[in-house]
Image (spheres, rainbow, N blue to C red):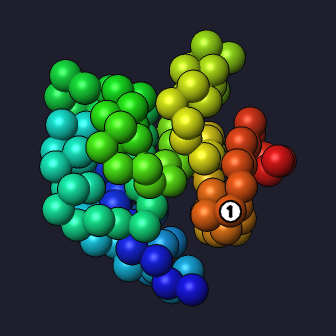
Amino acid sequence: MGIRVLLVEDESLISEMLSDMLEKLGHTVCGTLASGEKALGEVLKEKPDLVIMDIKLKGAMTGIEAAQAIKQARDIPIIYVTGYSDDGVVEQARETGAEGYLVKPISKDELRKCIDKALGQQCWDRGGALA
């Protein structure tokens, strides 16, 4: 069940770790970007099956703003992978229509479960238990 994933993460170590996890899960990383501004253009160009995005990114646009623009341009599943888990951030993320929210650090198993659910139903992780 390999899918094409666009990864939007501004921390290179985390980006490499996620890319490695995704490849071990049988998925293809079709792009790795560090800013929300570039993510929108890449989604239109590459047409990935899924976007995995951090909330804090380089540039003027946050991950939440980028997700809103992506959802308007193309209805594509989005999973947030972030270090922020306070209620306000979670509610903002949920309002974008994203399919998932994983708090760093994450395991390959958590990522796999959330991807599986994001492609069919919503998944919200608040530090361990997937919905």
Looking at the image, is 89 positioned above or below residue 123? above
Few, some or many residues within 10 Å of mark 1 (<14, 14–19, 20+):
few
Residue at x-position 34% and y-position 61%: 6
- Residue 74: image x %, image y %? 35, 50
Which residue is painted at 70% across and 49% down in the image?
A: 122
- Asked where in the image residue 68 lies, by quadrant, the reply is top left
Q: Where is the N terminus found, in terms of image quarters? A: bottom right
**Left or right placement of residue 56 versus residue 36 in this view:** right
Q: Amino acid at mark 1?
A: Gly
Q: Position of residue 104 (x, y in %)?
A: 57, 44
Q: Residue at x 61, y 41 (%)?
A: 101
Q: From the viewer's perspective, tell me whether residue 55 is left or right of residue 81.
A: left
Locate residue 86: give its quadrant: top right
Which is nearer the eye, 1 or 125?
Answer: 1
Q: Secondary structure at mark 1?
A: loop
* Residue 70 seen: yes
Identify which residue, 68 or 2, lies in the foreground: 68
Q: Is residue 78 above or below residue 60?
A: below
Residue 51 coordinates in the image, percent (x, y)? 41, 55
Q: Which residue is mark 1?
A: 120
Q: Pinpoint residue 89: horizontal percent, then vertical percent.
A: 56, 20
* Residue 14 seen in render: no
On the picture, is 55 further left or further right than 105? left
Numbered-mark total:
1
